[in-house]
Amino acid sequence: MKAMILAAGLGKRMCPLTLTTPKPLLQIGNTTLIDHALSQLQKAGISEVVINVHHLREKIIQHCGDGSKYNLKIYYSIEETLLETGGGIFQALPLLGDEPFLILSADVWTDYPLEKLLQKKTNSAHLVFVDNPNYNLQGDYNLDENGIVHDNLSNKLTYANIGILNPAIFHAEKPGIFRLFSVLKKFIAQGVVTGEYYSGVWHNVGTPQDLLLIQKFL
């Protein structure tokens, strides 16, 4: 299975740090956000990774290289225009192939065991959910007792920016700027998207305060 790291964002909430450093290269302890993600993928058994890049992309490409220092093969999907999550994944599909692939955001810090996802079979998507953080108290979607994702009004959880996607869900899409949730919406309505709840360590590293918080756990 291949994996894709979403790393193209501008990191606006991290300013002024991200004026000169792309968010995936921000330091946490003795590593960076993207090094942490790549290390997790390698330990899980992934051997090929696609990274989409836009903001200060040359620095990310120079830092990660061809992936050999991580015992990985890394390919880059360069976004001249920021395409959002869905558009960015769609553009990278030729690099990802026809089989389901793991998706992970570069700004997620977690101890979730990614190897669990390698065993998942899906014709649409399988998503990981966490408790709602302060910035997203309303949550994103519901998860029923059978592991089916729904879009009801109450008891929502937050999508952890970790999951498995089947490229078939993009067959009706065209190149452009769109979010992943706009693609998933119709499949969730059909009751074919599965998910799981994770209660372990998970942080979305969006602000300088988040960086300081995570340092305390190291």
Image (tube, rainbow, N blue to C red):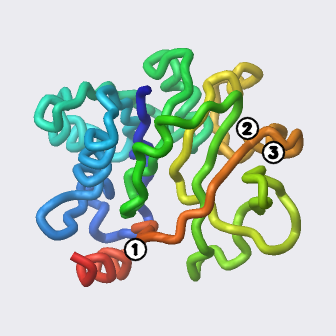
Distance (Cα) linking label 2 and label 3: 9 Å
Image-based side of 20 in relation to 166, left or right: left
Q: Sequence-wise, which precedes: disc 2 or disc 1? A: 2
Q: Nearer the viewer, mark 2 or mark 1?
A: 2
The image quadrant of residue 21 is bottom left
**Image quadrant assignment for residue 31:** bottom left
Q: Which residue is mark 2?
A: 183
Query: Which amino acid type is shown beneath numbered disc 1?
Result: Thr
Label 3 neighbourhood size at 10 Å, few (<14), some (14-19), many (20+)?
Answer: some
Identity of the amino acid at label 3? Ile
Residue 203 in view here: no
Q: Judge left or right: residue 13 versus residue 217.
A: right
Among the 4 quarters of the image, the one containing residue 129: bottom right
Q: Which mark is residue 207?
A: 1
Counting residues from the start of the chain, the first of labels 2 and 3 encountered is 2
Q: Which residue is mark 3?
A: 188
Count residues near mark 1 (Cα–Cα under 10 Å), then give few for <14, some for 14-19, many for 20+.
some
In the rendered image of this protein, does residue 145 appear above or below residue 126?
below
Residue 14 in sight from this viewpoint: yes
3D distance between C-alphas at marks 2 and 1: 27 Å
Q: Secondary structure at mark 2?
A: helix
